[in-house]
Image (cartoon, grey):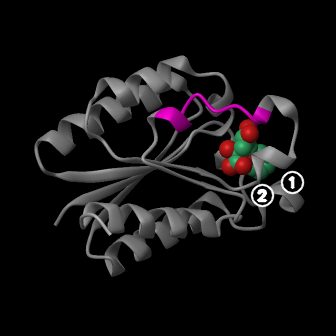
Amino acid sequence: MKTLLLLNGPNLNLLGTREPGVYGAATLADVEARFQEDAKRLGFQAECFQSNHEGALIDKIHEAGRRRAAGEVGGVVFNPGAFTHTSVALFDAIKGVGDLPVIEVHISNVHTREAFRHHSYISPAAAGIVVGFGVDGYRLAVEGLARKLSGPA
Ligand code: CA2
């Protein structure tokens, strides 16, 4: 059984503790538990990782790329947090590992927010993007990833 990875970037460990009007009431633990359930329902194993450090996220993407090549990992659901808008290094990591399907998720609709949130360095490297559905976006993303992994529609 292949593994799907959930990666969350900086400050997403604060989910459910502040700014519920923007990010909802669910905690990161809630999001990760739902991801585990959703992956299992879709026939996958799941692993979850959150970091506030860009290099740690890059290392996880490199590891995921190696594991994808070995047939262990199917793909990644990734909310890069504010690194979305700053990180050429995360773009390079995703492109650099080659064939790794990454679905980019944003809880909020970044396009209705400040202009600096409108550009994503990650989107050109992503296999799909889910924006503005609250934490339900993680479920939409894992379902979309599973569909992509099962072949063309
Ligand atoms: O909407 C999203 O998911 C974002 O990736 C969240 C990032 C933000 O920088 C992006 O522009 C859009 C911020 C995550 C911070 O999460 C918090 C959660 C609760 C309380 C404070 C921050």
Q: Residues within 10 Å of mark 2 (few under 14, many from 20)?
A: many
Where is 127 relative to 152, above or below? above
Identify the residue at the far left of this view. Answer: 70
Label 2 lies in ligand 1 vicinity (Cβ under 8 Å) = yes
Please state which of residues 11 and 144 is positioned toward the viewer in this rendering: 144
The residue positioned 86% from the left and 54% from the top of the image is 19
Q: Is residue 72 above or below residue 139?
A: above
Above or below: residue 8 compared with residue 85: below
In percent of width and height, residue 50 lies at 52, 44
Residue 9, percent across and down? Answer: 58, 39
Q: Does the stretch in magenta take in 57? A: no
Mark 1 residue CB less than 8 A from any atom of ligand 1: yes
- Residue 129 shown left or right of residue 75 in the figure: right
Name the residue rendered at 57%, 64% in the picture: 31
Quadrant of the image where one finds ligand 1: top right
**Distance Cα–Cα, label 1 vs label 2:** 6 Å
| The label number, if any, that marks residue 19 in the structure image | 1
Quarter of the view holding residue 114: top right
Marker disc for residue 23 = 2
Percent from the top left, x then y, of residue 113? Answer: 86, 43
Q: Where the N terminus falls, by quadrant? A: bottom left
**Three-letter residue code for mark 1:** Glu
The part of the chain drawn in magenta is 117-124
Task: Answer whether labels 1 and 2 touch (C-beta < 8 Å).
Answer: yes
Q: Main secondary structure of the magenta part?
A: loop
Question: At numbered mark 2, what does the secondary structure look like: helix, strand or loop?
Answer: helix
Q: Is residue 103 left or right of residue 44?
A: right
Q: Residue at x 26, y 75 (%)?
A: 43
Residue 120 percent location from the top left of the image? 64, 33
